[in-house]
Amino acid sequence: MKLIDEKTTYISPEAKIADSAVIYPNNTILGDTEIGENTVIMPNCIIDGCKIGADVRITASVMEGAVIADKTTVGPFAYLRKGADIGEECRVGDFVEVKNAKIGDGTKVAHLTYVGDCELGHKCNVGCGVVFVNYDGKKKHHTKVGDGCFIGSNSNVIAPVEIADGSYIAAGTTVTESTPRDSLVIGRARQVVKEGAGKGRF
C-alpha cells in the first residue's frame, strides 16, 4: 500500500490492505478490515472491521462492520453502521446513514438520507432527505425496494412496505402502503394558494 503519512495514520495489525491501495493522512483503520486493489482512503476516516473492495473511494466517513463492493464511492461524512452492505458502482454521499441495509449495484443515495433495515434494488435513485422509517416505538420493521426505483426528495417510507420494481415516488410523499410495479405514487397535501393573505405579516 501507499501510505502518505504514517505519523498521522493508525492501521491495525489485523488489517489486510492491497499493495495498490492509497491511504491518505489522518485515518484510523481498526480490526480485521480488508481493503482491495486501487482503493483510495481520503483523509479523516474511521474504518472498523469493514470489507472494502477494489477501486473504491472513501472520504471523511465512519464505517463499522460494513461491506463495500468494487467501484463504489462513499462520503464525505457518511456513516455506515453494522449490517451495511453496499453493492458495486454505488454512491453513498454526504450525511447518509446506512444501518442493517443492503444497497444493490448501481444505486445512488447521494445526501441527507437515513437507510435503515431495508433492501434497495439495483440502479435506484434515492433523493435528498429521504427517511426509511423503521421503528414504531417498540419494534424495528423492514422495507424492500425493487430495481430501478426513484424515491423523490423529502419522502418518508414507513415500514413495513414493499416498493415494487420501477416505482416512482414523488417528492414529499409519505409511503404507508406497498406499491405495484411501475407505479407513480403521490402522497402529500394539495397546495392551496390564498392570494393577498400574506400581506403585512412581516
Image (tube, rainbow, N blue to C red):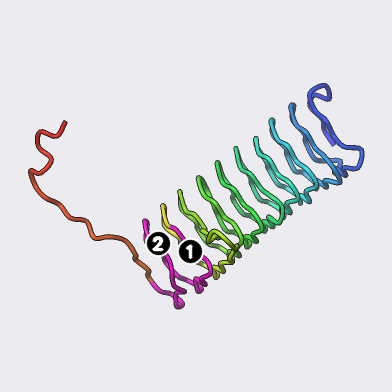
Q: Nearer the viewer, residue 69 or 184?
A: 184
What segment carries the magenta color?
156-183
Q: Secondary structure at mark 1?
A: strand
Q: Residues within 10 Å of mark 1 (few under 14, many from 20)?
A: many
Q: Quadrant of residue 119?
A: bottom right
Residue 179 belongs to magenta span: yes
For disc 1, the marked residue is 158
Residue 68 belongs to magenta span: no
Q: Amino acid at mark 2?
A: Thr
Q: Residues within 10 Å of mark 2 (few under 14, many from 20)?
A: many
Identified at 86% across, 41% down, the residue is 19
Q: CA distance from mark 1 to mark 2?
A: 7 Å
Instruction: Looking at this view, name the residue that lies furthest to the left.
Output: 196
Q: Quadrant of residue 186?
A: bottom left
Q: Amino acid at mark 1?
A: Ile
Instruction: Looking at this view, name the residue that lies furthest to the front.
Output: 138
> Which quadrant, please, contains the C terminus?
top left
Q: Nearer the viewer, residue 113 or 76?
A: 113
> Which quadrant, please, contains the N terminus?
top right
Rendering coords of residue 4 (x, y %): 79, 27
Q: Nearer the viewer, residue 87 or 186?
A: 186
Instruction: Looking at this view, name the residue that lies furthest to the right.
Output: 13
Instruction: Looking at this view, name the residue that lies furthest to the bottom.
Output: 180
Residue 196 relative to residue 121: left or right: left
Kindly check if marks 1 and 2 are in contact, taking CB atoms under 8 A apart as contact: yes
Badge number at residue 174: 2
Whether 92 is drawn above or below 146: the answer is: above
Residue 180 relative to residue 196: left or right: right
Badge number at residue 40: none
Identified at 53% across, 61% down, the residue is 136
Rendering coords of residue 28 (x, y %): 78, 33
